[in-house]
Image (spheres, rainbow, N blue to C red):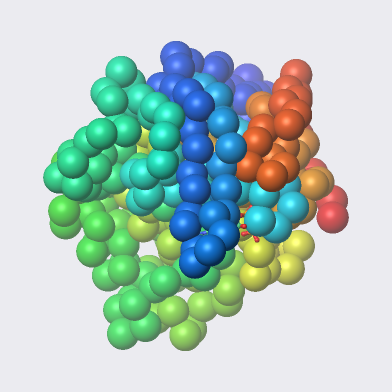
Amino acid sequence: MSVKSSVAESQPLIGEVIFEARGLRKVYPTGEVEVVALNGVDVNFSSSELVVLLGASGSGKSTLLNILGGLDVPTTGQMRYKGWELTDADEGVLTLFRRNCVGFVFQFYNLIPSLTARENVALITEIARDPMTPEEALEMVGLGDRMDHFPSQLSGGQQQRVAIARAIAKRPEVLLCDEPTGALDVTTGIAVLEAIERINREIGTLAIIITHNASMAEMADRVLHLSDGQIVKETRNEKRLPARELKW
Ligand SMILES: Nc1ncnc2c1ncn2[C@@H]1O[C@H](COP(=O)(O)OP(=O)(O)OP(=O)(O)O)[C@@H](O)[C@H]1O
């Protein structure tokens, strides 16, 4: 392997702690019964880390991700991002946090059908502080030759990569992915994971990925296992397996 390719493929050094969550609880009052979605979560996340969240349906993964991304607030507990207290932040602060610091990728791509790939990404680059160009972002996810295609002219995996380009064009410090490969077959799923891996490596973005697919654990620095609203197990991989070598 050449020096150049070994540098390009090496995993990034894990940086400083950016998220500190303490005693997170989320309770939904639904009629007569309360649903406890998170039940005392203490966890830190660092820049440049790639973390996979595993757990059965209903274990609290999306709730945790939504709280980390400022889409939801905990019932009790504390959430800090780079020392800023997000727990009691007003909606204006949370909006700025989401806009400047966080990129979201969901299972369904949420692209605007009447806009091309380039235009879908440009929607975000027009409001970001120091964005890449839509072209740069689409090149990063391997879609340099598909910029003027509409979503209906792209495969599911390509549409998801447009969604990733849109999420990363603002160079977010955090990329939160809720089952990004849930609707994809293995080959296209791996192309999507490679795009996430590249952003984590090249921009130093903290990437947190929710999945039901346990084989994806091997591409992570750290794997958090959730059950009944708690982190019940945490494992670390000394060496990450490149996404293209994953098998499921
Ligand atoms: N808005 C809500 N109102 C009431 N209960 C909710 C709400 N959102 C989530 N819950 C409940 O909180 C619990 C955790 O949900 P969450 O979506 O975080 O789980 P998950 O691990 O992401 O599940 P899945 O893998 O199925 O997406 C579940 O019991 C769910 O039904």
Residue 10's place in the image compared with 131, above or below, is: above
> Which quarter of the figure has residue 75?
top left
Residue 147's place in the image compared with 228, above or below, is: below
In the displayed structure image, the side of residue 166 where residue 154 appears, left or right = right
Q: Is residue 209 visible?
A: no
Q: Is residue 78 visible?
A: yes
Total labels drawn: 0
Q: Quadrant of the C terminus?
A: bottom right
In the displayed structure image, the side of residue 163 where residue 34 appears, left or right = right
> Which quarter of the figure has residue 187?
bottom right
| In-front residue for pair 134/4 | 134
| In-front residue for pair 115/44 | 44
Q: Quadrant of the N terminus?
A: top right
Residue drawn at point x = 47 percent, y = 57 percent: 29
Residue drawn at point x = 77 percent, y = 36 percent: 218
Q: Quadrant of ligand 1?
A: bottom right
| In-front residue for pair 10/184 | 184
Q: Where residue 129 sits: x, y (%)?
A: 17, 41
Q: Where residue 140 sits: x, y (%)?
A: 45, 49
| In-front residue for pair 31/229 | 31
Judged from this view, the residue extending furthest toward the right is 248
Residue 155's place in the image compared with 42, above or below, is: below
In the displayed structure image, the side of residue 186 where residue 197 appears, left or right = left
Residue drawn at point x = 16 percent, y = 53 percent: 127
> Which quarter of the figure has residue 138?
bottom left
Q: Where residue 43 sits: x, y (%)?
A: 55, 25
